[in-house]
Amino acid sequence: MKSRTTILFVLFTAAVAALFAADMAVGSVSIPLGDVWAALTGGACDPTTAKIVREIRLTKAIVALVAGAALAVSGLQMQTLFRNPLAGPYVLGVSSGASLGVALFILGAPMLGLQGGVWFSSLGIAGAAWIGAAATLAAVAAISTRIKDIMVILILGMMISSGVSAIVQILQYLSAEEALKSFVVWTMGSLGDVTATQLAMLLPAVAAGAALGVAAIKALNMLLLGETYARSMGLDLRRSRMMILLSTTLLAGTVTAFCGPIGFIGLAMPHVARVIFRNADHRTLMPAAALTGAASLLLCDMVAKLLALPVNSITALLGIPVVVWVVVRNKNLA
């Protein structure tokens, strides 16, 4: 069993590395892998090609790798915490909260006469989304300190998400056409809008979320057998729940802030990892989910570039069959 798992990790790591390189080669203009390698290592290469690879495609490929891994890990944590195979990283309103923050910034700022340059716009959108996502999760976390039933928290999170979505729709209805178009483009998700400066903010936040996720592995394994068992084993449920929720906020909230809402990766990829690795231990599942998430988003980014489509539409086409399979497999799902 250990040898099989080791082989799978080696194969998936190699696949992610290959997709990472291929993602830099694919685009509106194809670049041979040899030129990509030369551009990255400082070898003989056309200056224009080197600039495209280093300043545009390398950043985008890193974002795809990190975002895919972060969303898959956060989805795994949510599915274990709620013991629900259809729970995802946005189940507690991360996406809705981020959308509200961006809506207030893009749609609300022009109404107030606030305008700025490109730097103000890009960092403002990311910051507004992160604040919105964090505020929504903070509200749910505050509720969770008073309510012990995790399913009640799930329902309340969905209600908060619905309420926030209603406010966003009102803002859309009242906004000007140009601002509305910018907001709709953000909701489609994009990996190419993240600059090197933003990447320097995205990576530490995701790393912190991943560190909290690793610290919560023991708690996640206990929660697989139910909260009653976990409590009998001496687990501090409130502390563990807060740690998992904070990890999800940092992982999914940060990705949503900088890349927009990217659906189905967090919901579908943990199931793919479970099926392929045939293991319920989060010491195996967490890195496995990270690898499958990274590989899937790199692949989706390549397809999106080839077809000139939003990456969110490609992730939906990839993830929907997996979700349908999960529903069919769990016919008795309440």
Image (cartoon, rainbow, N blue to C red):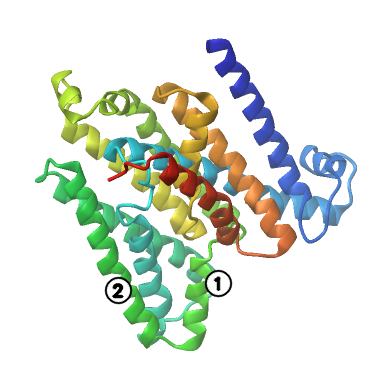
282 horizontally vs 161: left or right: right
Amino acid type for the residue under numbered disc 2: Ala
**Viewer-nearest residue: 84 or 325:** 325
Furthest residue to the left? 146
Where in the figure is residue 56, as x and y percent of width and height?
A: 69, 55
Residue named by callout 2: 166
Residue 193 position (above or below residue 24):
below
Looking at the image, is mark 1 or mark 2 nearer the viewer?
2
163 horizontally vs 60: left or right: left
Residue 204 showing in the rendered view: no
The circle drawn on residue 286 is none
**Viewer-nearest residue: 139 or 280:** 280
Amino acid type for the residue under numbered disc 1: Val
Residue 269 position (above or below residue 234):
below
79 horizontally vs 202: left or right: left
Circle nearer the N terminus (1, 2): 1
Q: Residue at x 45, y 66 (%)?
A: 125
Q: Secondary structure at mark 2?
A: helix
The residues tagged by marks 1 and 2 sit, at their Cα atoms, a distance apart of 29 Å
* Mark 2: few/some/many CA within 10 Å (<14, 14-19, 20+): some
Residue named by callout 1: 118
* Mark 1: few/some/many CA within 10 Å (<14, 14-19, 20+): few
